[in-house]
């Protein structure tokens, strides 16, 4: 008989010491009873009792130290026995047991807890694994006596009622030290105990021993059936072996997510709560990284309704519905995480509308895939969040299965922002067909969203802006820059519009889109600044262009530029007049067959029916033309339509003309007339070409003196009488005199 790591191994090699004979059954009872004891193999795994001898009649088992009755062929005529057999060298053991300077070693936790040895208080004990030797759950602790709670990780009860206080100090504490990772039983209580130890006691934070939690990839997986709450933790790092262990089989046949939700209802996997009414509870400086998290047992099927018990969220920041506490989280980083198959990958907010203070939250290098309603759902008003270098694919496909509730409206998106500030940088995304967001890649219901650098292959809307946070009456505009929304299979059916913009002051630049950018009414004339390119046939559309004149577009697919400004009262129709789009800046572009190039400027009054001015260039001869109180409505026949009742002036300069002013009166402000029918008011003739320095004034012409009389209205005026071929000057009242003989 020998002693080995307090697991007593006995082997009988001959008749005198209990050799059993080939293949004989060996039964071990507690001394003086017929109660069979637990037997283990050399690895600490349970074996049957009776056990069986080998061909040579030898047998080996591990059992706690003590006295036992051992039977060969128990109950048979050939039965033999060794009664009151002492297993363990008590002389050596007592010396080792009582020497506090020497540690005692077990192979497993079970062997330690079942041992009948009475260790003195202060004894140091090692165990080489949790369930089996070298399974990652090894640790050591000190024997203590008194009240305690056996939680399977920090305190272990011994057979005599004392307990071992485990060592949880050091660089990191592995969740395997609490027995998690078999994938058979619920691991959430084991996780929760570790996070509770990282929190410390309420108010004082006394008793905290954990600052770094290690969640390695286990031999199987972590089965989570209840939410793991992180609450009142100041400074902690939670990390795994990298977001590498993932499901790789089609249809979910190869289930390899490290952390998997098996809960009976839809709840978060991790909840960062941080109630503010308890001093130790606000969460500060939390970092979670290098994990693979799945919200369901298998892959979700995007063509079917999501199961009712998928995880509500992979990481949940804030309260649950029914919890009404204010929450606070400062300086949190989520990094290198793969979160799939939840309703929301990451969720932040307050279902009850209680105050939330979540800032700054950095989400970096996240892989968000197949989450039914959103990859990220951000609803924290008092927050600053950054989504950086993240990849989102196929989130938001199942939003129509979730009627609006306290967690979300019925919106499906890769990124959904309900309130707060969100900066999205170096972002990539994919999704088409059933595997794309229902509403938009990035959906801004409120708050403020800015995007700096994005490559989106997601079909449908890239960005939908519904509203923005109002501060002192002014909305918080978005900055959208460096965006590429294009994928080879996009067309006018699956991606007719790339962006919807509703917040005045938003800037869009250095970007390329497949679909239109639609500027929605409500911009109140405040401009949207832009410098973008579109695929063929697309551009700016919507009432923000035609009615609200809320666009500054410096360069688009036609190499044109527009500055459309308004400022009129809400509801005033400022649609430009004429067949030519008004421009402030013109790059020399005009359509084939046009007599005139595009209007370079049009300024209208701020009320319906007001007059205005249109400016353009004659593409044929370079004449610069102004039309006061009118616009060119027919480019071929040079037809002008008045803007309001009154005088219409047509002023021409440059080109083949020096300076010409034509006039026509409109009695109804709507009936068009040709330029040729207008009366010549004033003209400066300039000789063409090299003789251009030769000029002369050409007076207005008429066959008789003006019929209109009113005091000295015409005094000092000159006109050319085509009947007498003389210049005539008015010297007062109705008196006209010839100026030439």
Image (cartoon, helix red, strand yellow):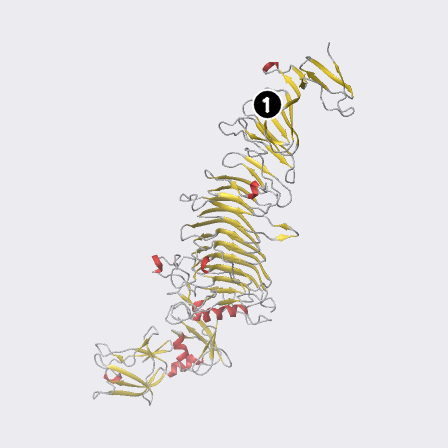
Drawn side of residue 65 relative to residue 556, left or right: left
674 up-or-down from 380: above or below? above
Residue 646 higher or lower than 388, as above or below: above
**What residue occupies the far bottom of the structure in this picture?**
32
- The answer, for residue 509, to whether it is visible in the render is yes
- What secondary structure is found at the residue carrying circle 1? helix
Tell me residue 74's x, y (percent): 25, 86
68 to the left or right of 232:
left
Give residue 309's position: percent from left, percent from top. 43, 66
Instruction: Give neighbour class at mark 1: few <14, some 14-19, many 20+ (Cα, 10 Å).
Output: few
Mark 1, residue position: 676
**Foreground pick, 213 / 294:** 294
- Residue 122: horizontal and vertical position, in percent? 49, 78
Which is nearer the eye, 457 or 224?
457
Q: Quadrant of residue 639?
A: top right
Q: How many marks?
A: 1
User: Where is residue 159, by image quadrant?
Assistant: bottom left
Quarter the C terminus occupies: top right
Residue 403 horizontal/vertical position (percent) = 48, 61
| Residue found 41% across the figure and 60% down from its top | 305
Drawn side of residue 277 relative to residue 38, left or right: right
| Residue lying farthest to the front in this orientation | 707
Q: Where's the N terminus, which quadrant?
A: bottom left
Judge whether 588 appears above or below 158 on screen: above
Residue 249 in sight? no
Closest to the observer, 417 or 728? 728
Q: Quadrant of residue 2?
A: bottom left
């Amino acid at each position: 008989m020998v002693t080995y790591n307090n697991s007593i191994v006995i082997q009988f090699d001959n008749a005198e010491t209990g050799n059993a004979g080939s293949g004989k059954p060996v039964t071990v009872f507690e001394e003086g009873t017929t109660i069979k004891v637990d037997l283990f193999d050399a690895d600490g795994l349970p074996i049957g009792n009776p056990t069986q001898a080998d061909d040579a009649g030898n047998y080996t088992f591990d059992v706690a130290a003590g006295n036992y009755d051992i039977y060969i062929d128990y109950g048979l005529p050939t039965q033999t026995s060794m009664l009151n057999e002492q297993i363990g060298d008590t002389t050596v053991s007592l010396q080792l047991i009582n020497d506090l300077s020497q540690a005692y070693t077990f192979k497993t936790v079970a062997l330690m807890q079942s041992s009948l040895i009475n260790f003195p208080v202060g004894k140091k004990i090692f165990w080489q694994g949790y369930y089996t030797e070298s399974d990652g759950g090894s640790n050591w602790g000190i024997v203590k006596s008194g009240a305690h709670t056996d939680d399977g990780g920090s305190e272990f009860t011994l057979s005599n009622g004392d307990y071992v206080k485990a060592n949880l100090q050091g660089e990191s504490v592995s969740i395997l030290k609490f027995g998690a990772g078999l994938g058979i039983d619920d691991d959430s209580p084991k996780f929760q105990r570790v996070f509770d130890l990282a929190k410390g006691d309420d108010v004082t934070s006394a008793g905290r021993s954990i600052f770094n939690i290690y969640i390695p990839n286990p031999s199987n997986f972590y089965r989570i059936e209840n939410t793991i709450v992180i609450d009142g933790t100041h400074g902690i790092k939670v990390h795994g072996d990298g977001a590498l262990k993932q499901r790789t089989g089609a249809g979910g046949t190869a289930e390899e997510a490290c952390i998997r939700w098996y809960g009976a209802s839809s709840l978060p996997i991790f909840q960062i709560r941080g109630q503010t009414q308890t001093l130790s509870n606000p969460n500060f400086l939390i970092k979670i990284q290098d994990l693979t998290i799945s919200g369901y047992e298998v892959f979700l099927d995007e063509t079917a309704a999501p199961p009712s018990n998928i995880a509500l969220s992979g990481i949940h920041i804030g309260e649950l519905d029914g919890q009404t506490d204010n929450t606070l989280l400062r300086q949190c980083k989520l990094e290198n995480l793969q979160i799939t198959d939840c309703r929301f990958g990451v969720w932040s907010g307050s279902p009850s509308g209680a105050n939330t203070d979540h800032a700054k939250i950095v989400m970096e290098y996240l892989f968000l895939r197949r989450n039914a309603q959103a990859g990220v759902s951000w609803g924290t008003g008092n927050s600053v969040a950054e989504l950086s270098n993240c990849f989102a694919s196929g989130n938001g496909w199942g939003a129509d299965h979730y009627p609006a509730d306290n967690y979300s409206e019925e919106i499906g998106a890769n990124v959904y922002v309900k309130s707060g500030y969100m900066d999205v940088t170096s972002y990539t995304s994919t999704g088409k067909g059933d595997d794309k967001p229902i509403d938009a890649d990035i959906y801004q219901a409120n708050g403020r969203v800015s995007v700096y650098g994005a490559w989106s292959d997601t079909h449908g809307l890239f960005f939908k802006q519904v509203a923005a946070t109002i501060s002192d009456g002014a909305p918080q505009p978005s900055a959208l820059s460096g965006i590429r929304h294009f994928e080879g299979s996009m067309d006018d059916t699956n991606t007719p519009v790339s962006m919807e913009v509703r917040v005045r002051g938003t800037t869009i630049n250095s970007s390329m889109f497949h679909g239109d950018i639609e500027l929605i009414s409500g911009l109140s004339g405040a401009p949207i600044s832009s410098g973008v390119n579109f695929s063929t046939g697309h551009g700016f559309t919507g009432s923000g262009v035609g009615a609200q004149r809320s666009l500054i577009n410096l360069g688009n697919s036609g190499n044109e530029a527009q500055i459309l400004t308004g400022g009129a009262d809400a509801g005033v129709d400022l649609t430009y007049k004429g067949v030519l789009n008004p421009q402030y800046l013109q790059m020399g572009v005009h359509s084939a067959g046009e007599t005139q190039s595009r209007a370079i400027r049009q300024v209208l009054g701020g009320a319906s029916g007001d007059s205005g001015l249109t400016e353009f260039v004659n593409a044929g001869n370079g004449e610069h033309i102004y039309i006061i109180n009118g616009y060119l409505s027919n480019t071929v026949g040079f037809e002008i339509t008045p803007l309001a009742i009154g005088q219409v002036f047509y002023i021409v300069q440059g080109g083949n003309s020096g300076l010409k002013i034509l006039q026509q009166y409109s009695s109804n402000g709507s009936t068009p007339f040709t330029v040729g029918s207008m009366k010549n008011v004033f003209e400066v003739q300039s000789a063409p070409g090299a003789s251009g320095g030769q000029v002369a004034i050409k007076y207005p012409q008429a066959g008789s003196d003006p019929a209109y009389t009113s005091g000295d209205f015409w005094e000092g005026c000159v006109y050319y009488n085509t009947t007498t071929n003389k210049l005539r000057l008015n010297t007062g009242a109705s008196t006209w005199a010839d100026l030439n003989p």
